[in-house]
Amino acid sequence: MASLRRFSAALGLFPGAVLILWGIGAFGIWDPWELNVAEAARADVDGTELELEFRGPTFAVWLLAQSFRIFGVSELSGRLPIALGALALMGAVYFIARSYDDKKAGIIAALAISSAPIVLFNGRGMFGDAWAMAGNALVGLFAFRVAFRSSGKALALDALGLAASIALATAAAGVLSGALPPLLAVGIVAALRAPDLESGMPRLRALGVAVLGAGAALFTGMAIVADGAAYSHWLGGAPFGGEPPTFDAGLERVFHGFGAWSGLMVIGLARLLSPRPATLPAEAAEGTGGGPYREAEDAAEGAVSEAFFVRISLLLWTAFGYGALMLYTARYGETTFHSVAPVAVAIAMLLRDLVRSKGSWWGEAVVAGLFTVLILRDYALFPGTAVDSLPLLDLTLPEVFNPRSAWGTVVVLFLGALALTFAAGEGFAKKPDFRAPYAFIGRQWGAKVEGVAPLKLAAVIGGCILAGAAAAFAGNGGLVAGVLLAPVVAVGAVVYLTRPRLSAGAGWLTFTLFLGALLMTFGLACVIAKGQLQLASIALRAGKRIVVLLVALPIALVAGQLALWLGAKLGAFRVAPILLAGVVFGAYTSFGYLPALSAHFSPRPVYDAFNELRADGEPLVEYRVSGRAAAYYAEGDEVREIESQSELISYLSGDERTWAVIPADQLPTLNRAFRARNRRHLFVADAENARLLLVSGREVEGAENASFIAEAVLDEAPTPQHPVGANFNDKIELIGYDLELPQEGFAGAGQDFTIVWYWRALSRTPGSYKIFLHVDGAGNRLNGDHDPVDGRYPVRLWDQGDVVVDRQELTVPANYRPGQYTIWLGFFSGSTRLEVKEVANGSKDNVNRVNAGTLLIR
């Protein structure tokens, strides 16, 4: 039986281990963050000097150096020691939750912590603080065991474990944020608990931990006051200048760091202050000794139970960890939140209490769901919030990296699992009766409420709706009047025929029927007769959505009943959906988001492309790029570095094919110089990385040019849909433009559309001219001022003869009324505009704007 329990625990922890370990060597080294650590470790192995200075702990550098000595230098050997720290954290959290609650709570806590972004990001990169988190968790585990659980030989082992974990946490993060939060929290709890313990060794152990926590706090406080310039193990860093963050910055870091689990984190921590049973159910107590609930007799006598002290210790641990985070980031540099263990345990205890209650927790579901929606909003709108938990400076995500839909999918999945887990109580264990909603409607029809005149109520409300609808759609023809009056007449007839028996409930149902019929009729009219309604397109789209919504409502009702029934049938395993959704969330974080982000932060894709495409003997140079990464990835001869643009252009213009790695933002300038000499564009062989590009002076057989300039700057002009022929001061010509509209011939309010402008440079245009665009009509203006080609190829780079293709995406505001809107445009620099000399197809005004045509909005 014991071996079976151990096997089930190992099986429960297996997904977490996969999330942490799988594929840690499959993506490139982040430059400069991982590269700095790797270079420091290599210097340690080689015994060479390194110019980089580390202000924080160097424990990770030491670990990487040992791994490089054993396994050689690679991404896998560099990340493996850090990933082992994340595994140690998961194991520590499992044993903490098991000691505080039971084995199932341990598995839940381990899965929650191993699928949280704060752990996955810090456990799958060389820069991560996984060992600091593990040391922090181990200090809390052993401190609590020494204070309350150990005896005999176990006491000596636990005391040794406590000493080792304090040393580990201090080496990995310093005492302030590594060892102090759990030690001080358990020390305070031990001091409060000591009077209730037996005199002798139990009380002595508790007081010993309390003294240890007080001593650590005292010496750490002295180090803070001293504010020495050198690195301090008490603080885990050295003071630096700068603006300290605000209090809410730390909250965002912690909240975003736990990802989809953040909603449960808030509820779990709040619930630590709520009363809980003093006894543990038999099925939960099996194999655990009863956990913190074993003191039923003490609780019955009025003594404070151990469960209370457990909850207080977890809450204090979290609070002290947050305080250490804020203090450190204000004075000593970037760090992450290390006290993640008590948060995971609080989540596990919350879910175990939910299972034991066997009921539906609607209030907790709503609050946790709202916080999860907040995570969905932040992750979708600001993808960089997912990596807020990393202790890295100057980490900015490239604009081209947009995982919005992927984050939305996994968080919505978690949200649905959360709702199912909290709502599916034993009250839904019976097979659902799909006739129940109709029976409820029947009961409401006969319900009576004294003092209510339902017939008058229905008539007044129906009249108001009819008047509003008539006002809204007046003037749109007899069809609209017909589709609106038909349900009114039908419902009115029902009301008249049933008025002697009409009750209050029937009145409300009549009103609902009236409203539903009205909406459904309007929606069907938008689908069937949209061409005859002559309504704004936004109203037509809303009508179509109404039809889908009204059809989907009964289907959703049936699906919801089935889901709740199946969830209730899970019984003791009702948390399985949310755990599975959490693992899916973690899987995307580890195997989707992180590798995709690494493609932009690591130069590896660039050098992999070179190794694949180059022929034997073809050289590679680097232009204004740190040459450290080439030593890890580039094959062939040693990579040479070029600092001069003219030298690089000469190198790429030779008779033989040559290669160069360049910064992505240098491509427009370099391409212009190369094109002036060779009358062709640079060939971009790889543009997967947002910061670096692999370029060649000659085409590569079987590969397409990935340069945006090759598509945006042409030698010959295409034939536009709408020719204009506007001359701007003999410097720029607007050849014409294409309109890409969501509907044939028009765009609707709230919809996106695209204008493709075709420009010809008649001569060089010095200065910083930009394009202004005014789409005017019906008292509204849609402003589209911009630099051409998404700001990547400004006017100052245009050479005589260049034909520039400028795609501009715009959105019609939702409040725009239907009508014809005039497209005005020109060039401006500050308050100066380029003079409009002539317009072949169109007109101009007296403020140097060109009337390029009209846009129909419906």
Image: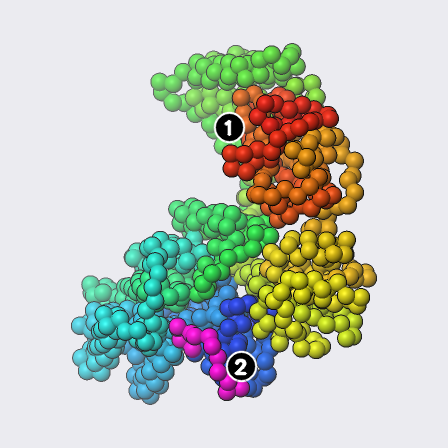
For the C terminus, the quadrant is top right
Instruction: Confirm whether residue 833 shows in the render.
Output: yes
The residue closer to the viewer here, 767 or 376, is 767
- Under mark 2, the amino acid is Arg
Colour option used: rainbow
Compare residues 379 and 409 and report the one nearer the observer.
379
Q: CA distance from mark 2 to mark 1?
A: 78 Å
Residue 640, position as x, y percentages in the image: 65, 73
Q: Is residue 402 above or below residue 749?
A: below
Residue beneath disc 2: 42
- Say what amino acid the circle numbered 1 marks: Gly
- The location of residue 159, given as percent across then percent down, is 32, 83
The residue that mark 1 highlights is 442
Quarter location, residue 73: bottom right
Can you see residue 165?
no
Q: Secondary structure at mark 2?
A: helix
Magenta stretch: dominant secondary structure? loop
Please tell me whether residue 498 belongs to the stretch shown in magenta: no
Left or right for 807, reference 583: right
Closer mark to the observer between disc 2 and disc 1: 2
Task: From the top left corner, tell me how far across and down residue 37 is, in percent.
Answer: 50, 74
- Left or right position of 125 against 732: left
The one of 415 and 66 positioned closer to us in this rendering: 66
Task: Write down the region rendered in magenta.
Answer: 46-58
Tag 1's secondary structure? Answer: helix
Instruction: Say above or below: 158 vs 821.
Output: below
Percent across and percent down for residue 542 are 59, 29
* Looking at the image, residue 517 lies above or below residue 340: above
